Image (tube, rainbow, N blue to C red):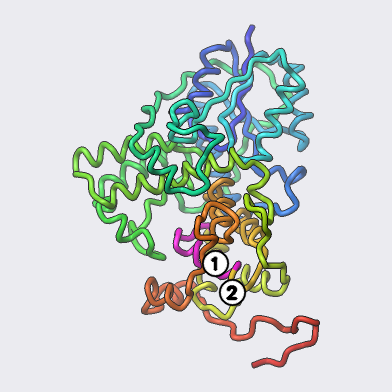
């Protein structure tokens, strides 16, 4: 009897999931477990509990995955023990697991458990696949270990390469009769937000987007702060793997064949390649994704000012635009790409804050949190990552004039400016109110 154990992380789907499909074809029974990306008991020092919006979105995504599994006489299980390695060790022994599968994860911390399992149980057959990237290492025209230090050379090398076509939905074997070591996933009905979540809704969202003309004007709208169809809104479903980048690329290609290709449709591909770059960037640089100096040798000339950081988090800075952005983030768990760049630049440049604090705050609140994209983009802004120009400093006044000239976004998210930033000077003396 061959018993399989599949570890879901950021690949919450049954279609185009090569690792799951391969594992399912090689075992007689299968146990499906979800491992939280952030394990609060073994987290990095910068990690915090997910926000309410982030927790809601995860709950909706896992509920959808559970329902997909139930349709194949399977179930989604959670570990009872917060010590993941200990809990998995018990399952491996009691269920006599012979095969373990998972999708390759770009996160340094998320890779540790997989490596420990391989060290502790060398007799088990391990199956992994690059299910959340456009390409696999052997299909990249450049070695993953020789990834260029900036995006443009990578883009030029890969943009003409056609990714593999998505594969069909996995057909799963039954689960074992009894698994007392695990808790069956139970959805919390009070945790819900109105955002597409899970594989079925992801496919519906993909289809609906390309039924509109939005893709034909994406390049002109992508930098907007808000509006209808200004963004693809694919990032949340991509972050949890409810859809694969290959499925999006396939839909984009079909749209171009039917409606015609232009600069805007290319720009959707361009953004998928940015995401791809950061995934390989994270795999290459490992723990340096979280270092103050990033992948560079010099540290930024910034520090940590608790009062400034708190005001940035709460949207109480001298910038009305930044405040509006932070209000939208904390209330909804999502902000546009341009808004993220503006908020990050203000945090690092105007407030002179340690970029890692801003990245950790985004990690806590974003419903589309992706370890590679989030920390890679923050490094880029802070000048310790993939930006060949050594960081980006956005002129906030200019950004407001370009993207919110009438103040509609600021009004929508109540971004009133707070004139005074600090209550104390650099040696601790109280400052008078201006």
Q: Are marks 2 and 1 in contact (CB under 8 Å)?
A: yes
Q: Is residue 14 at least partly visible in the picture?
A: no
The numbered dot on residue 201 is none
**413 to 4, vertically: above or below:** below
Point 50% across, 55% down: residue: 388
Query: Of label 2 and label 1, which has the lower sequence position?
Result: 1
Q: Which residue is mark 1?
A: 345
Residue 51 lies in the magenta stretch: no
Expressed as whole percent of the image width and height from the top left, the position of residue 60 reads 53, 44
Quadrant location, the C terminus: bottom right
Mark 1 residue element: helix
The answer for how far apart the CA atoms under marks 2 and 1 are is 8 Å
**289 to 430, vertically: above or below:** above
Q: Which residue is mark 2?
A: 350
Expressed as whole percent of the image width and height from the top left, the position of residue 383 reads 57, 60
Point 68% across, 15% down: residue: 124
Magenta segment range? 333-348
Expressed as whole percent of the image width and height from the top left, the position of residue 225 reads 41, 65
Q: Closest to the observer: 293 or 8?
A: 293
Instruction: Identify the image quadrant of residue 390.
Output: bottom right
């Amino acid at each position: 009897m061959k018993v399989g154990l599949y570890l879901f992380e950021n690949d919450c789907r049954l279609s185009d999931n090569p690792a799951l499909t391969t594992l399912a074809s090689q075992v007689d029974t299968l146990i499906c477990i979800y491992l939280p990306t952030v394990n609060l008991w073994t987290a990095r020092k910068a990690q915090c509990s997910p926000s309410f919006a982030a927790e809601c979105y995860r709950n909706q995504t896992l509920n959808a995955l559970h329902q997909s599994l139930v349709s194949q006489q399977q179930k989604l299980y959670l570990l009872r023990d917060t010590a993941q390695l200990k809990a998995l060790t018990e399952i491996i022994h009691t269920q006599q697991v012979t095969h373990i599968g998972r999708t390759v994860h770009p996160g340094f911390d998320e890779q540790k458990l997989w490596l420990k399992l391989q060290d502790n149980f060398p007799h088990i057959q391990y199956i992994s696949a690059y299910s959340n990237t456009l390409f696999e290492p052997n299909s990249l025209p450049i070695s993953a270990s020789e990834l260029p230090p900036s995006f443009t050379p990578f883009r030029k090398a890969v943009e003409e390469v056609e990714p593999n076509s998505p594969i069909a939905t996995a057909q799963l074997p039954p689960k074992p009769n009894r698994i007392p070591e695990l808790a069956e996933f139970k959805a919390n009905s009070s945790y819900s937000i109105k955002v597409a979540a899970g594989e079925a809704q992801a496919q519906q969202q993909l289809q609906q987007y390309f039924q509109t003309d939005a893709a034909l004007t994406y390049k002109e709208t992508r930098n907007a702060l808000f509006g209808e169809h200004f963004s693809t809104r694919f990032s949340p479903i991509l972050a949890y793997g409810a859809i694969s980048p290959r499925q999006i690329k396939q839909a984009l290609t079909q749209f171009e064949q039917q409606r015609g290709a232009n600069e805007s449709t290319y720009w959707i591909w361009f953004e998928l390649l940015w995401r791809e770059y950061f995934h390989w960037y994270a795999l290459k640089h490992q723990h340096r994704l979280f270092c103050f100096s990033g992948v560079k040798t010099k540290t930024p000339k910034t520090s940590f000012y608790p009062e400034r950081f708190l005001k940035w988090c709460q949207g109480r800075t001298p910038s009305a635009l930044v405040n509006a952005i932070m209000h939208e983030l904390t209330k909804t768990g999502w902000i546009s790409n341009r808004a993220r760049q503006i908020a990050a630049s203000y945090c690092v440049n105007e407030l002179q804050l340690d970029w890692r604090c801003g990245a950790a705050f985004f990690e806590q609140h974003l419903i589309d949190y992706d370890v590679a994209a989030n920390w890679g983009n923050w490094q880029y802004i802070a000048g310790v990552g993939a930006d060949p120009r050594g960081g980006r400093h956005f002129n906030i006044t200019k950004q407001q004039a370009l993207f919110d000239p009438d103040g509609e976004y600021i009004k929508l998210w109540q971004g009133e400016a707070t004139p005074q930033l600090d209550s104390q000077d650099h040696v601790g003396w109280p400052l008078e109110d201006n």
